[in-house]
Amino acid sequence: MSTRIFIVEDEPSIAQTVQFALDAEGFVTEHFPTGTACLAALKHSVPSLILLDIGLADGSGFEFFRHIRQLSEAPVIYMTARDAEIDRVAGLEMGADDYIVKPFSLRELVARVRAVLRRVESSPVPTTSMSDIFQIDTVRRQIHYHAQPLDLTLHEYRLLETLLSHPERVFTRGQLLERGWDNPDHRLERTIDSHIKSLRNKLREIKPDTDPICTHRGVGYSLIPDA
Ligand code: CA
């Protein structure tokens, strides 16, 4: 599988140069001119690493970092223009994996990217085995069902993760909404039903004769992993 790198940078010339250098190294890159565009993409794709400019046109990279972390565990390297920001980066301790000061050489950039990727790849993957049937990889935001990867949307992933966190416990729609949505609107509790439906369809594609999700009429849902 190719290593995908998101580049969040509002200056086209820098973005192009970085993209060119990383493409030449065999990485697959995607460029986002705004933090908002990157967040939108993270709802349906999982990059291996994110290069995040601190001074973006639509907000600060620090602020976007917090939002990125709600959607993705991918390592982040800050790209900062001013020396003064280094102190802030160090002081913030916001969990970014590294930072690089502009103007940087492309060799240095590639070396940093490789170093961070190596570090992440060599650390143990916190795969939680719920049972023989479900496995969750929280870093890659991936759930396997009967050893097959499920292709889930963000909300489907969060729903299934919640249900798997306490097998057999009944979650109300409200509880599922609270855990799965960033800005839960309780008037929309019925939206849970349609997401459960699509989740069930995806599980059924792998194992047509079983349904591990139980409906509790008027209440909510639970999950029995080895149903
Ligand atoms: Ca900038």
Image (spheres, grey):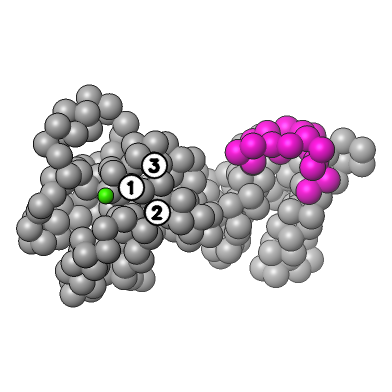
Q: Secondary structure at mark 2?
A: loop
Q: Which residue is mark 3?
A: 59
Tell me which residue sits at (92%, 38%) in the image. Answer: 218
- Is residue 25 at least partly visible in the picture? yes
Name the residue at the top extreme.
91
Residue depicted at x 13% and y 49% = 102
Marks 1/2: CA–CA distance? 6 Å
Q: Amino acid at mark 1?
A: Leu
Precedes in sequence: disc 3 or disc 2: 2
Q: Is 181 within the magenta?
A: yes
Q: Quadrant of the N terminus?
A: bottom left
Tag 3, which secondary structure? strand
Which residue is at the front of the view, 58 or 50?
58
Q: Taking 86 as reference, is 9 above or below it?
A: below
How many angstroms separate mark 3 from mark 2 (CA)? 8 Å
Callout 1 touching callout 2 (CB < 8 Å): yes
For label 2, the crowd category at 10 Å Cα-Cα, with few meaning under 14, some 14 to 19 and many 20 or more, is many
Residue 34 tag number? 2
Question: Bounds of the magenta span?
Answer: 170-191
